[in-house]
């Protein structure tokens, strides 16, 4: 009798759940993250009150020393939100949405901060014109220009994440591809830690910050496909690696603070962040749908861009004359109000103007990309012009005139695998001195 060995069954990838749409709790978490950073900059770092912070803010100054970790929460949320917003969308949609989301408020922030620093006699020197112009590219770090505002360091980190993840978006987001990307990026992060002299690896792997983006991506996979042991192990690894990755920034902050900042606080704060994101992934906050949360989320990015150097100038100018609590609270309220105005009168009009034009630009790029259908249309046109039977043109281009994929008049584009979908006509935010805390005076 012959015994035939059979291979063990291979488990299919998890089935996707129905997408939940916008998650208001993420708007709230983003607002909490930016408040942590603002309080850190006004109470614990950089602001010159003229006397010890422990005397001015006797209760707030110690926890405020951990506020810089709001940026790590931003990165966790960013990994989650990028997957949420880009699943099933094209690379052009992804790139357009990032340009529209990042640049209008950023350009306004660069110009507004430059104007305030030049006009208000505070403790910050205005940047040279050439440096301001370089900052407008958002590439000031690779070009070697000083930041107009210290918080801009995190945009260079976010931008690299977007560029790397765009490769996965171009392939098409699936459970396996996103998980493979997470595992490969984690491996690259470990190698970068082991080889600090490899500059290219450092730039691409981002070993100080990659763990939080990877954690956010893994949490999104949990939300969309359900948790499993592999995803929990990946999240746990990024938490442990993240606790180690934030140590250089912690040491810088502890040295600048002038008072004890316990190291165990790092682990506690990160644990809270990861617990909150686990709650988002497992849908613990399904009842959180307060009407003000979308507005809070909308002001987060402008508030992050505007608050630091402008706030420091005001503290230096008026900190000796105005009650510190009143000044810090008034600055926070004023910055939130200004951020809403930037969202309402800069971001939204710019988005309405830029989205259709970027969509048209990408459509024109697709029109000129080589593809079998475009090549067939080109050959048919050439044969017809040479006097061949016009029927050959019709057979070469079964879609008829104006129906080729990528044509500005054509309503459909071919997806990978042959699926057809309608292109989006209107495609739908975050260290170099002190390793992640911004540039001081």
Image (cartoon, rainbow, N blue to C red):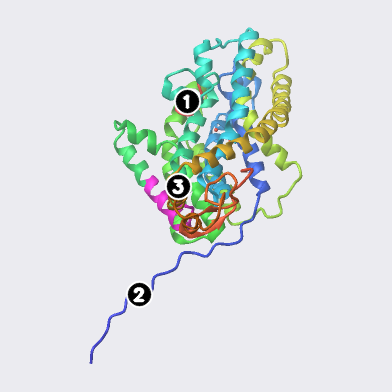
Callout 1 touching callout 3 (CB < 8 Å)? no
User: Is residue 181 a member of the stretch shown in magenta?
Assistant: yes
Query: Image height check: is 103 above or below 315?
Result: below
User: Is residue 225 a member of the stretch shown in magenta?
Assistant: no
Q: Is residue 367 left or right of residue 28?
A: left
For the point 70% across and 37% down, the residue is 296
Query: Image height check: is 347 above or below 224?
Result: above
Mark 2 or mark 3, which is nearer to you? 3
Residue 426, quarter of picture: top right
Q: CA distance from mark 1 to mark 3?
A: 40 Å
Query: Image height check: is 55 above or below 20?
Result: above
Report the magenta stretch's main SS.
Answer: helix
Query: What x and y, as percent, mark residue 179?
Result: 44, 54
Query: Image height check: is 67 above or below 366?
Result: above
From the image, tell me which residue sits under label 3. 378
Judge whether residue 42 can be spotted in this image: no
Q: CA distance from mark 2 to mark 1?
A: 51 Å
Earlier in the chain: of badge 1 and badge 3, it is: 1
Query: What x and y, as percent, mark residue 44?
Result: 58, 24
The N terminus: image quadrant = bottom left
From the image, tell me which residue sits under label 2. 8
- Nearer-the-camera pick, 366 or 338: 366
Residue 139 circle label: 1
Query: Which region of the structure is painted magenta?
Result: 171-186
Earlier in the chain: of badge 2 and badge 3, it is: 2
């Amino acid at each position: 009798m012959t015994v035939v060995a059979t291979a063990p069954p291979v488990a299919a990838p998890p089935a996707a759940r129905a997408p939940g749409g916008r998650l208001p709790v993420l708007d709230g978490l983003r607002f909490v993250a930016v408040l942590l950073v603002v309080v850190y900059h006004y109470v614990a770092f950089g602001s010159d009150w003229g006397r010890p912070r422990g005397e001015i803010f006797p209760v707030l100054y110690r926890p405020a020393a951990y506020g810089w970790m709001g940026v790590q929460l931003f990165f966790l949320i960013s990994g989650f939100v990028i997957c949420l917003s880009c699943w099933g969308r094209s690379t052009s949609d992804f790139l357009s949405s990032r340009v529209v989301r990042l640049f209008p408020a950023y350009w306004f922030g660069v110009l507004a901060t430059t104007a305030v620093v030049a006009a208000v006699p505070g403790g910050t020197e205005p940047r040279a014109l050439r440096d301001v112009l370089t900052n407008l590219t958002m590439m000031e770090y690779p070009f070697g220009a000083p930041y107009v505002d210290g918080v801009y360091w995190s945009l260079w980190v976010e931008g690299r994440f977007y560029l790397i993840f765009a490769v996965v978006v171009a392939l098409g987001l699936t459970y396996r591809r996103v998980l493979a990307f997470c595992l490969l990026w984690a491996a690259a992060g470990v190698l970068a830690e082991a080889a600090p002299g490899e500059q290219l690896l450092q730039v691409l792997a981002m070993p100080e910050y990659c763990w939080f983006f990877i954690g956010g991506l893994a949490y999104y996979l949990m939300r969309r496909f359900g948790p499993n042991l592999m995803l929990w192990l990946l999240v746990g690894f990024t938490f442990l690696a993240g606790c180690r990755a934030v140590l250089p920034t912690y040491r810088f902050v502890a040295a600048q603070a002038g008072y004890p900042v316990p190291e165990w606080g790092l682990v506690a704060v990160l644990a809270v962040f990861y617990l909150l994101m686990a709650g988002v992934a497992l849908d613990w906050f399904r009842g959180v749908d307060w009407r003000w949360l979308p507005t809070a989320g909308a002001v987060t990015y402008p508030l992050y861009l505007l608050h630091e150097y402008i706030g420091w100038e005001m503290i230096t100018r008026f900190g000796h004359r105005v009650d510190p609590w009143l000044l810090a609270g008034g600055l926070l309220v004023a910055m939130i109000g200004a951020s809403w105005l930037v969202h309402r009168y800069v971001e939204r009009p710019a988005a309405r103007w830029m989205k259709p034009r970027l969509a048209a630009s990408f459509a024109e790029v697709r029109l000129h990309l080589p593809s079998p259908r475009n090549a067939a249309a080109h050959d048919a046109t050439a044969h017809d012009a040479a006097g061949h039977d016009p029927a050959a043109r019709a057979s070469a281009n079964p879609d008829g005139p104006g129906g080729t994929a990528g044509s500005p008049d054509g309503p459909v584009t071919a997806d990978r695998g042959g699926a057809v979908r309608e292109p989006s006509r209107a495609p739908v935010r975050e260290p170099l001195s002190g390793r992640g805390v911004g540039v001081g005076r």
